């Protein structure tokens, strides 16, 4: 009876993981790996933003509750996997303190939607593909999105009859999706940004000078876009690395996207050497 129940739970967890990945949602999978008789049991915690739902159980209600609470912290950390001893986050559960639990982040492969297949967009798509992202490259000029220009299998090419429709279809609800708007003009930028500003995209970046990006943002503001959403747009796009060439600009954009996804600070790792004086110095 117990074996049949465990098998049913495993099937349900697998089915739920498939749905989560298909929908672009996020979840944490907790697995008992040491210190318990029921090693291998799993608890899936799905975070839909507005609520948390679970599938499976680690065998004890108190243990499940502690793991569910810690799953939110784990997901916020942006880590892919990590092993915890229960006493690290639930010291009150002394009877289970030596239990070890593997936390795994469940999320579809990172996706980058790129609006504009000019020099920067092309370089960005190729770099993102090399970094393991599924890149969708959109342009309203069919000759700019051909397999002759992009042979990489990780790059999806979209010839847009209408910018807004094409971008909206590619981004969906935005979960697990980063968007880089690098088109050739104000009008195209505005169409793309307007189409996705209400989504839950992980990252939205807009290329251009401060003046150009401010013009686009102000137009959306005047047409009713929420200020909270506009404040999340990275405009101008990318980290300040002094980029000049299209390839360097693409690198600056990907650096910022990685920083946002992983919770990085975007600074120099060696900065401490210049701000902290060695002992014994004046």
Image: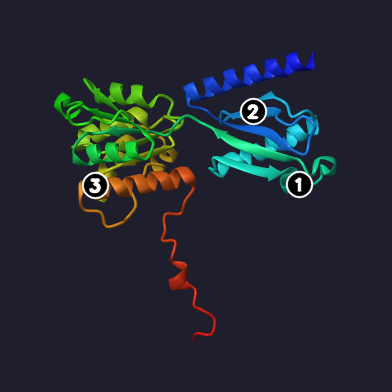
Specify whether residue 237 is in view.
no
Within-10-Å neighbours for mark 1: few <14, some 14–19, many 20+: some
Q: Nearer the viewer, residue 87 or 200?
A: 87
The residue pinned by badge 3 equals 247
Residue at point 18%, 31% (across, down): 149
Q: How many other residues sit within 10 Å of disc 2, few (<14), some (14-19) or many (≥20)? A: many
Is 119 situated left or right of 237 in this image? left
Nearer-N-terminus badge (1/3): 1
Tell me the residue that label 2 is attached to.
44
Disc ID at residue 2 = none
- Callout 3 environment at 10 Å: few (<14), some (14 to 19), or many (20+)? some
Where is residue 234, by image quadrant? top left
Question: How far, Cα to Cα, is label 1 from label 3?
Answer: 47 Å
Which image quadrant: the N terminus? top right
Most extreme residue toward the right, as rendered?
95
Residue 9 shows in the view:
yes
Q: Is residue 69 above or below residue 271?
A: above
Give the alpha-carbon distance from disc 3 to disc 2, as whole Å: 40 Å
Report how far apart the C-alphas of labels 1 and 2 lie in the structure.
Answer: 20 Å
Q: Earlier in the sequence, mark 1 or mark 2?
A: 2
Numbered label tally: 3
The answer to the question of whether label 3 and label 2 lie on touching residues, with beta carbons closer than 8 A, is no
Q: Residue at x 48, y 45 (%)?
A: 262
Question: Relative to 159, is 88 above or below?
Answer: below
Q: Is residue 234 left or right of residue 53?
A: left
Q: Where is residue 26 shown, x and y percent of the image?
A: 54, 31
The numbered mark at residue 87 is: 1
11 and 194: which is toward the camera: 11
Secondary structure at badge 2 equals strand
């Amino acid at each position: 009876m117990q074996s049949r129940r465990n098998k049913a739970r495993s099937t349900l967890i697998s089915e739920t993981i498939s749905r989560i990945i298909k929908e672009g949602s996020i979840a944490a999978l907790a697995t008992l790996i040491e210190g318990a008789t029921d090693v291998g049991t799993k608890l899936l915690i799905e975070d839909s933003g507005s609520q948390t739902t679970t599938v499976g159980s680690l065998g004890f209600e108190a243990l499940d509750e502690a793991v569910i609470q810690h799953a939110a912290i784990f997901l916020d950390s942006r880590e892919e996997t990590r092993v915890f001893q229960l006493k690290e986050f639930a010291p009150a559960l002394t009877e289970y303190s030596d239990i070890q639990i593997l936390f795994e982040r469940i999320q579809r492969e990172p996706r980058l939607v790129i609006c504009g297949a000019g020099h920067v967009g092309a370089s960005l798509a190729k770099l993102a593909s090399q970094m393991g992202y599924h890149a969708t490259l959109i342009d309203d000029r069919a000759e700019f999105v051909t397999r002759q220009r992009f042979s990489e299998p990780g790059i999806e090419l979209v010839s847009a009859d209408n910018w807004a429709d094409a971008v909206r279809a590619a981004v969906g609800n935005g979960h697990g999706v980063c968007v880089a708007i690098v088109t050739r003009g104000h009008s195209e930028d505005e169409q793309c940004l307007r189409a996705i500003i209400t989504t839950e995209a992980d990252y939205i970046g807009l290329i251009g000078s401060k003046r150009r990006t401010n013009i686009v943002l102000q137009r959306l503001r005047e047409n009713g876009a929420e200020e909270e959403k506009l404040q999340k747009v990275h405009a101008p796009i990318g980290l300040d690395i002094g980029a000049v060439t299209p390839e360097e600009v693409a690198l600056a954009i990907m650096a910022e996207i990685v920083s946002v996804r992983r919770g990085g600070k975007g600074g120099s790792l060696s900065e401490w050497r210049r701000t902290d004086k060695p002992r014994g110095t004046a």
